[in-house]
Image (tube, coloured by chain):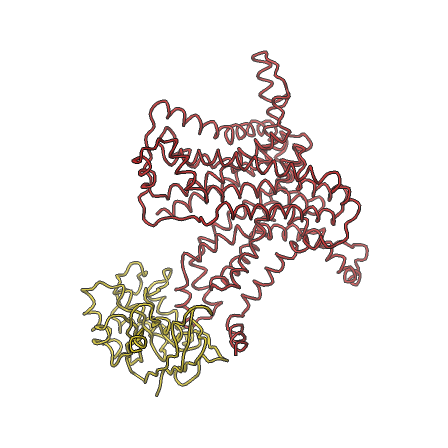
């Protein structure tokens, strides 16, 4: 089953500027971990924002779990798309504890099931002891794991990760990459990871898509 | 195809937040448009009379007042700002914020305090007469003149220039000034050649605020008997009840404001406030004996005349009249003032939060909406007042059949006699104060938390209450205090828009002063000053936080 299906997507920040994304089509199958590789400015983060519904394309359509979420006539708001996202700087709510952050996305779950789901997620990312901490009391790697748990908690159709390693120390990278792969496989989630580092893709992803000036080079 | 995209965008963006913002913005703009519409009505003979014999004087005195005050506040504000940033002298740390204090004394209070102090029976002449047996020519000390008004405005409004220029200079990199010294410039030459040109955008920004205040003023000018367009607007209304002519005058005043705006743009030209990141700030230089004494004397003199002397005088007068004034009527007055200010501020903050939240997503439309709701600040109070008044009278005329249907035939004026009119006036005039504070708050948190919340399944409204609101509550609080204080101090709007027999602290103070009951006015003056100090404290707190 195609979890994400993108047809002929065109996007630019204003009507006068060059399109950052110009006629992109791609599809992601269920349970795939796909890396999108490209230099900065190539529009890969924008692609994630388009899938999440944080930007609106000029042309083209996106289907998530075989339901249209954006086309020329239609726009489904981000909260109704069933898409999870880990932001580049994690965007953990600074006024909420780890527990509250993870609980935040569970408002559609019956009240009784929320607490167990949070516990389950904390266990998945091995952060059980930190549940009462505030984000600023955590290290960068810990924040990333909380952010991952928060995004996975509502059981999204697809998880989008924007440059997951850009804010981490280089010597921690290898270890965290391995952890991430284990967590993603355990969670059985379809995932799109945007990065500029080929090594990220090689160690985590099932396949990769290269973005950027390639077309121009070939011409 | 384009149409389809636009329709999709509207469907995507449009929600209750936009609807409320647009309604609010319309209410804000309506009275101002009303003032302009007066230019298309047929003028009556009052207008011809004013245009023929008076308008020339009004415009001349207004421009003279604005120009002189602008230049003098710039001189005072910039020199003081440079002294406290670049040099070290006794009590400099105190002067750094102490020199802002004159802002806590509204000019109309300063005006009556100084006029009384300098009058024949006032402390200055009385002391000279009794202690030194010296009879001064009373003309020398007569400040009920254009000169006097310039003196008052300069001393009590210069802190705007001081505050902005000081903040600007404190953020400048030391290397500019050190380079100038290495290149062989003396301190005075550095001030003229480097400091002044460098801080031009800040100076212009400060002076513009001063000019807006002067153009808005009714208290000082009417008390001193000066004929500005603002006083003319009031006299046309209070003397002749001629709204149309008053609106025409307001439209003229508006022209001056627009002119100022254009001059400001030209003076700043392409310069903007530019704060280089992570620069080493200027280290203050220790002054030697003589220059340290001179710097201290200058700062202390301005501080005394601008704050200490009138403040102490008001305390002395309060001691004389406290028992007489401090009674139930007075409590009602304080309560009424605070109550109306509270309601107005609350409305402002609610609308400001809604509009600012809508405008976080940048687009041409949100840019205009933001400019639109904050126009009231750059428009003198008299214009806002007369626009609101005309609008409400017009509304009452339209609604007359409805009133009649409800059995109130003998009450043709309902809205324009109610407190609603004053509150609407306040909201229009002070929207910008609240809005700007909140905008800064939103800019600081960015949009990532909001986006995270949306992706986690919360709609716009839930996101606002669970994420945005808790994160900007500090900004909302400081915006609330600043707006609240502005409203408590405000005079012209309150005078013109209050319901019959309704007094606020500022109108009562003004009334006392006008009736030559100066001593009685001191208690309410001190309360207004105390409230104003609150906003200075808040500003200091924000300043500290930014530094940390």
Q: In this rendering, is residue A7 above or below B160? A: below
Q: In this rendering, is residue A201 above or below B184? A: below
Tally of marks: 0
Q: Residue A132: x, y in percent?
A: 31, 63
- Residue farthest to the bottom? A1
Which residue sits at x=49%, y=67%? B461
For this view, does A99 lie left or right of residue B479?
A: left
Q: In this rendering, is residue B526 above or below A163? A: above
Which residue sits at x=51%, y=50%? B480
Q: Residue B30: x, y in percent?
A: 65, 57
- Residue farthest to the front? A219
Q: In this rendering, is residue B199 above or below A200? A: above
Instruction: Note whether residue B33 is visible.
Output: yes
Which residue sits at x=75%, y=60%? B399
Q: Residue B237: x, y in percent?
A: 73, 44
For this view, does A143 lie left or right of residue B315?
A: left
For this view, does B133 lie left or right of residue A12?
A: right
Which residue sits at x=55%, y=54%? B374
Q: Which is nearer the eye, A135 or B544?
A: B544
Q: Quadrant of residue A63?
A: bottom left
The colour assigned to chain B within the rendered structure? red
- Residue farthest to the top? B133
Q: Residue B306: x, y in percent?
A: 51, 31
The colour assigned to chain A within the rendered structure? yellow
Instruction: Note whether residue A120 is visible.
Output: no
């Amino acid at each position: 089953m195609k979890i994400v299906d993108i047809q002929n997507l065109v996007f630019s920040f204003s009507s006068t500027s060059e399109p950052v994304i110009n006629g992109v089509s791609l599809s992601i199958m269920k349970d795939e971990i796909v890396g999108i590789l490209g230099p900065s400015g190539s529009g890969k983060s924008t692609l994630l924002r388009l899938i999440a519904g944080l930007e609106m394309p000029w042309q083209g359509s996106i289907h998530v779990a075989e339901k249209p979420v954006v086309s020329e006539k239609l726009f489904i708001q981000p909260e109704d798309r069933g898409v999870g996202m880990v932001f580049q700087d994690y965007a953990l709510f600074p006024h909420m504890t780890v527990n509250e952050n993870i609980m935040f996305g569970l408002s559609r779950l019956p009240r009784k099931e929320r607490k167990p789901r949070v516990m389950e997620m904390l266990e998945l990312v091995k952060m059980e002891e930190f549940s009462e901490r505030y984000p600023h009391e955590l290290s960068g790697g810990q924040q990333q794991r909380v952010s991952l748990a928060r995004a996975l908690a509502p059981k999204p159709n697809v998880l989008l990760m924007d440059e997951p390693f850009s804010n981490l120390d280089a010597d921690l990278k290898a270890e965290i990459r391995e952890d991430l792969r284990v967590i993603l496989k355990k969670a059985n989630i379809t995932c799109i990871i945007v990065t500029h580092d080929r090594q990220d893709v090689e160690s985590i992803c099932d396949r990769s898509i290269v973005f950027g000036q390639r077309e121009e080079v070939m011409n | 195809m384009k149409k389809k995209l636009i329709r999709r965008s509207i469907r995507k963006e449009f929600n209750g937040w936009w609807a409320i913002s647009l309604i609010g913005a319309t209410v804000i703009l309506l009275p101002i448009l009303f003032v302009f519409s007066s230019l298309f009505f047929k003028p009556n003979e009052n207008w011809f009379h004013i245009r023929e014999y008076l308008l020339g004087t009004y415009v001349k005195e207004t421009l003279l007042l604005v120009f002189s005050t602008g230049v003098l506040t710039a001189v005072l504000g910039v020199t003081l700002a440079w002294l406290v940033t670049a040099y070290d002298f006794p009590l400099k740390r105190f002067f750094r914020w102490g020199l802002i204090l004159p802002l806590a004394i509204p000019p109309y209070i300063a005006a009556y305090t100084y006029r009384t102090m300098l009058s024949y029976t006032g402390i200055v002449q009385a002391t000279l007469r009794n202690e030194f047996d010296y009879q001064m020519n009373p003309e020398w000390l007569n400040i009920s003149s254009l000169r006097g008004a310039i003196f008052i405005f300069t001393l009590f409004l210069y802190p705007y220039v001081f505050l902005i220029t000081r903040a600007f200079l404190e953020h400048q990199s030391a290397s500019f000034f050190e380079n100038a010294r290495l290149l062989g410039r003396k301190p005075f030459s550095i001030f003229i050649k480097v400091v002044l040109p460098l801080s031009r955008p800040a100076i212009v920004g400060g002076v513009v605020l001063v000019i807006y205040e002067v153009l808005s003023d009714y208290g000082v000018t009417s008390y001193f008997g000066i004929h500005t367009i603002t006083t003319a607007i009031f006299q046309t209304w209070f003397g002749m009840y001629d709204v149309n002519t008053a609106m025409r005058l307001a439209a003229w005043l508006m022209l001056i404001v627009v002119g100022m705006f254009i001059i400001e743009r030209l003076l700043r030209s392409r310069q903007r406030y530019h704060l280089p990141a992570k620069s080493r700030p200027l280290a203050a230089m220790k002054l030697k004996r003589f220059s340290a004494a001179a710097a201290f004397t200058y700062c202390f003199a301005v501080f005394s005349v601008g704050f200490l002397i009138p403040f102490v005088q008001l305390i002395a007068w309060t001691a004389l009249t406290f028992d007489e004034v401090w009674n139930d009527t007075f409590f009602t007055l304080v309560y009424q003032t605070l109550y109306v200010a509270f309601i107005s501020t609350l409305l402002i903050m609610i609308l400001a939060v809604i509009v600012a939240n809508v405008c976080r997503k940048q687009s041409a439309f949100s840019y205009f909406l933001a400019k639109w709701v904050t126009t009231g600040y750059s428009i003198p109070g008299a214009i806002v007042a007369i626009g609101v008044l005309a609008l409400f009278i017009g509304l009452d005329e339209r609604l007359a059949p409805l009133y009649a249907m409800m059995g109130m035939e003998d009450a043709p004026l309902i809205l324009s006699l109610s407190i609603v009119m004053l509150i609407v006036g306040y909201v229009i005039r002070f929207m910008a104060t609240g809005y700007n504070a909140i905008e800064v708050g939103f800019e600081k948190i960015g949009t990532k938390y909001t986006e995270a919340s949306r992706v986690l399944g919360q709609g716009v409204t839930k996101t606002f209450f669970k994420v945005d609101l808790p994160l900007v509550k500090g900004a909302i609080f400081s915006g609330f205090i600043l707006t609240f204080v502005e409203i408590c101090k405000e005079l012209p709007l309150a005078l013109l828009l209050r319901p019959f027999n309704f007094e606020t602290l500022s109108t009562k103070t003004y009334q006392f002063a006008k009736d030559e009951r100066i001593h009685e006015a001191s208690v309410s003056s001190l309360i207004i000053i105390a409230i104003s100090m609150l906003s200075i404290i808040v500003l200091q707190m924000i300043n500290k936080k930014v530094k940390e």
